Image (cartoon, rainbow, N blue to C red):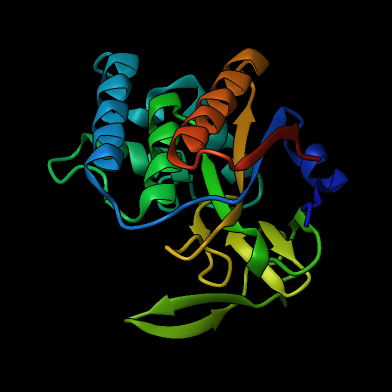
Amino acid sequence: MTLTLTVSDEVHTLVPGFTPLAVEAHGLVNGPSNEASSALLDDAARRLTERLDGRAPHEDPHMVAWRAAYSAFGSKPSRTRNSAEALAKRALADGGLPRINLLVDLYNAISVAHLIPVGGEDIDSVVGAMRLVRATGDEPFHTAAGGEPVVEHPDAGEVVWRDDEGVTCRRWNWRQGVRTRLTEESVNAVFLLESLAPMSRAALDAAGTELAESLEKLSPGARITVHPAG
């Protein structure tokens, strides 16, 4: 199955500088975090430290742009940070980045090293096309609270990724739902890299290429395609 991803005109109108890139992969091998995936995360934190050169993550020009985008749809960027800024803060903290599973560790490492929001979805759990839209507020979002499954709803006008069943990621890339997240059993996935001006297309493509190459090393023989989303 080839997944269709679209970005609505209302999102492009809200944030004209938005450019997404999708890395679609079939036949992946996943599993628990290991020494190799941990090393990728440690190296990403090192690269981030060099990139920031003493600045806080939110002072990076790309993160400044994401904060403006969050403000544009009514979200407080200092309270609900985009996924790249949130991961970067964890990477620089004493506890470091979390170890989740091989695939999640891999795309988190790309996100931190390039300071770009990256998400991963299990294609086999996605229903219909995925699209980035402004929510009506009625869409279901399956998540967890206190270890128990709950259904939330986005705010009206909030930018969300969704499929035919409901929201897959709230506040653009702030919180992923449990329904389509990558687990150790996932074999088919799509990874979304999301950039805003002033990040260049060359820098976006470099992040996508590095992700694709890392996936090939993890899963020799996997079918991997890099293509624009939208």
Q: Residue furthest left?
A: 94
Q: Is residue 8 left or right of residue 177?
A: right
Above or below: residue 223 compared with residue 131 = above
At horizontal 56% and vertical 72% (from top left) the residue drawn is 179
Q: Is residue 109 left or right of residue 194?
A: left
At horizontal 45% and vertical 84% (from top left) the residue drawn is 149
Which quadrant: the N terminus? Answer: bottom right
At horizontal 33% and vertical 81% (from top left) the residue drawn is 147
Residue 155 visible: no
Residue 63 spot, x, y in % from top left: 48, 30
Residue 147 visible: yes
Residue 22 spot, x, y in % from top left: 68, 39
Which quadrant: the C terminus? Answer: top right
Above or below: residue 182 compared with residue 60 = below
54, 2: nearer the viewer? 2
81, 149: nearer the viewer? 149
Q: Residue furthest right?
A: 9
Please identify the quarter of the rendering in which residue 88 is found.
top left
Residue 167 spot, x, y in % from top left: 66, 67
Residue 42 spot, x, y in % from top left: 23, 32
Q: Is residue 214 left or right of residue 225?
A: left
209, 77: nearer the viewer? 209
Count of numbered tags: 0
